[in-house]
Image (cartoon, rainbow, N blue to C red):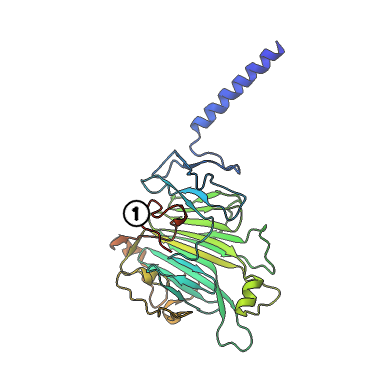
Amino acid sequence: MKSLSSRSISIILLTVVTGFIQVTSVPEPTTTPSREFYCSAETRCGRQFLRCPMECPTTTSPDPKAKLCYADCGFPECSVQCRQPKANCKAPGSACFDPRFIGGDGIVFYFHGKSNEHFSLVSDFDLQINSRFIGHRPAGRTRDFTWIQSLGILFNSQTFSIEATRAATWDSEVDHLKFSYDGQDLVIPEGSLSTWYSPEKDVKVERLSGKNSAVITLKDKAEIMVTAVPVTKQDDKIHSYRLPANDCFAHFEVQFKFFHLSSKVDGVLGRTYRPDFENPAKPGVAMPVLGGENNYRIASLFSTDCNSCIFSPESGSNQETSPVMNYGTLDCTKGASAGYGIVCRK
């Protein structure tokens, strides 16, 4: 009788749990690696479980270098792909190191800016992406060594920022990401695939690993992959930064992927996506530097007052935009074409 009662209770509990799962629109976050990528109800691929490929069989991994299974649920193809849980600094749309950019045209260039100043990276009629540079100038140098410390985004009458917090020494077990939304601090719990949406669901932030890496998706406009990193002792030695002992200059490695931009887009990086842009960077030069600090300097992280800024949300909806072909997130390690109809070459 006792055994029967326990069994009956188990059946009742199972029924209740099963009913709960059926009415829940989004699965609860889990730290257990999943072999399927779930697209939530509010996306174009709503409520679909997409099976991960063999090359990246899980959505999470304790190995920070492991490829992860990912699907862009905002696209009607509803297909999965493999990607690294950090920015690809060797691909178009990237901004890394002492800022080294790879433009939309695939050409490498440097933009030094100045420490503790702000610059427009992308300025379009309906999108503004700014950055704050931090830096260090050793004795005897004529310019600052600089790195991207934070990003400020203006999109659909909203503001969003992400910042790499200062640290004397780097600890990879500590999260160095700080978020804000519309002027208020925003807490996004640590943990792979921890996700936050804006009230209108047009801004999405997702942690790609437990700490220090996230991807920001602006609906139908852009995807921004951000990884917080320090300037290492090896970097310091190679480049003769001569950094002080009390600051590891935590900064960002960033990779931008744009879906639609106007033909008049501007900014340090944005200009390289214009169809008529002729990059003045000289091929074969070890460090081709593109200037123009005065054209892209802004007063603060959310300012739009640079000489070349065109951000105008009132008129943005009336401007014609074009799809942008992105190569930066392609994974060429699994074959010649990687399924995109593009031949991967070294």
Image: 250 above or below 27: below
Image: 144 above or below 230: below
Q: Quadrant of residue 271?
A: bottom left
Residue closest to the eye, 125 or 183 = 125
Query: Which residue lies most toward the bottom here?
Result: 140
**Where residue 5 sits in the image (x, y, percent)?**
67, 14
**Where residue 342 sits in the image (x, y, percent)?**
36, 57
Query: Which residue lies most toward the top here?
Result: 1
Q: Quadrant of residue 139?
A: bottom right
The residue lying at 29 percent from left, 72 percent from top is 276
**Where residue 21 sits in the image (x, y, percent)?**
53, 31
The residue lying at 61 percent from left, 44 percent from top is 31
Image: 85 above or below 307: above
Q: Is residue 109 visible?
A: yes
Q: Is residue 183 visible?
A: no
The residue lying at 67 percent from left, 13 percent from top is 4
Q: Secondary structure at mark 1?
A: loop
Relative placement, left or right, of 3 versus 98 is right
Residue closest to the eye, 343 or 216 = 343
Image: 8 above or below 272: above
The residue lying at 40 percent from left, 55 percent from top is 336
Tell me the crowding category of disc 1: few under 14, some 14 to 19, or many 20 or more residues within 10 angstroms, Cα based.
few
**Where residue 60 sits in the image (x, y, percent)?**
57, 47
Residue closest to the eye, 234 or 227 = 234
Question: Which residue position is annotated with label 1?
Answer: 341
The quadrant the N terminus occupies is: top right
